[in-house]
Image: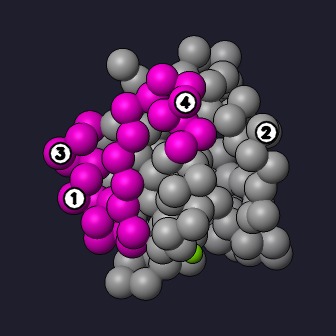
Amino acid sequence: MKKILIVDDQKGVRRLLEELFKKDGWEVELAADGKEAVERADKFLPDIILMDMKMPNMNGLEASQIILKKYNNLDIIMMTAYGEMDVVKEALDAGVKRCITKPFDIIDLRNTVNQMATGKVS
Ligand SMILES: [Mg+2]
């Protein structure tokens, strides 16, 4: 079973995405901030991480940088706010595969994740 780690400080977003991806047959783990994401990535070894940018304790960029140093082929999709173009550039430079703008279209997000999982998008 493919594994996805969902990282967002908003409980509602975590729940929504958890439900969506579980329905699609993913094994899902959740984290509420960047620090938790780094810990979970080590234990869960996900195939894909959906990473929010703005979070307390450690933001999504920092967490992605740490995780990608260890697992440089891991697919990370970052969720940024509109207008965070400098962050998007830094994230892509660090090896984040995709950045999507919040509020995201859930169907688009689902398609992107599933395409990545089947290797159709790199
Ligand atoms: Mg947030």
Sequence-wise, which precedes: disc 4 or disc 2?
Answer: 4
On the image, numbered disc 2 is attached to which residue?
Answer: 108
Q: CA distance from mark 3 to mark 1?
A: 7 Å
On the image, numbered disc 1 is attached to which residue?
Answer: 39
- Tell me the element at label 3: helix
Based on the displayed image, in which of its 4 quarters is residue 71 positioned? Answer: top left
Q: Which residues are magenta?
A: 19-45
Q: CA distance from mark 2 to mark 3?
A: 28 Å
On the image, numbered disc 3 is attached to which residue?
Answer: 43
Sequence-wise, which precedes: disc 4 or disc 1?
Answer: 4
Q: How many marks?
A: 4
Based on the displayed image, in which of its 4 quarters is residue 52 positioned? Answer: bottom right
Tell me the amino acid under the disc marked 4: Lys
The residue shown at (73%, 72%) is: 81
Tell me the amino acid under the disc marked 3: Lys
Q: Is residue 91 left or right of residue 28?
A: right
